[in-house]
Image (cartoon, rainbow, N blue to C red):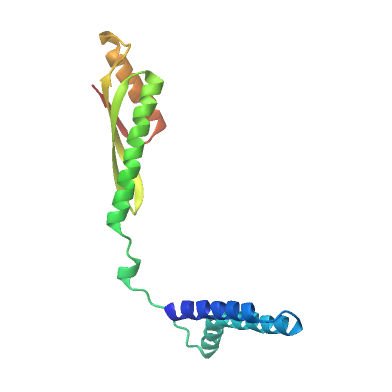
Amino acid sequence: MQAYILSVCGAVILSALVAILLPEGKLGKFIQGILRLFCLFVVTMPLFSFVVSWKDGNVKLPETDAQETALDEEFISYVFSRRAEEEEAAWCEYVSEEFGVRASAEVLWDFVDYAYKVTQVKIKIEDFGIYEEDEHIFVIEQIREHISGMISAEVDVYE
């Protein structure tokens, strides 16, 4: 693959240099046309070899090394943890705006088959703001019901 890329780059650079040095006129246009055909030939060369090998019955698709195609689980874990942090900040902001309380959130997640799945959302209310002491349980239950209706994960709201 590296040789193919180098040959394509070389053909393009060579044709660009020759095009700069060519005189204008019919001869220059003729040579530029030939250079374009040359670049097209270089780009399509792997297709010709594939067709010939297909015709002969010698088609061998490139084998991939399992190490090359294995997903980087450490990177996936990092990306999902960043996503969970963003969701935590969003939940804190949402609870603050919707219910008028200051809270911190924790999003517990898991990745199954390389997919991000929220398993639990924990919201700790740090300051109830304008709500009195008797209304705390009512507000906690209201937040739990509201968020449970929005997501399919377990929701835990506490003081």
* Figure quadrant of the C terminus: top left
Which image quadrant is residue 129 in? top left
Residue 82 at least partly seen: yes
Residue at x-position 35% and y-position 19%: 142
On screen, residue 23 above or below 92: below
Residue at x-position 36% and y-position 23%: 96
Which image quadrant is residue 156 in? top left
Q: Residue furthest left?
A: 159
* 41 vs 113, nearest the viewer: 41
On screen, residue 90 above or below 43: above
Residue 119: percent from left, percent from top: 30, 40
* 105 vs 111, nearest the viewer: 105
Residue 87: percent from left, percent from top: 36, 37
Q: Residue furthest bottom?
A: 56
Residue 70: percent from left, percent from top: 32, 64
Q: Is residue 22 left or right of residue 145?
A: right
Residue 31: percent from left, percent from top: 68, 84
Residue 122 at least partly seen: no
* Figure quadrant of the N terminus: bottom left
Which image quadrant is residue 94 in? top left
What is the number of callouts on the image?
Answer: 0
Q: Residue furthest right?
A: 26
On screen, residue 17 above or below 91: below
Q: Is residue 12 left or right of residue 2?
A: right
Residue at x-position 47% and y-position 88%: 58
* 155 vs 97, nearest the viewer: 97
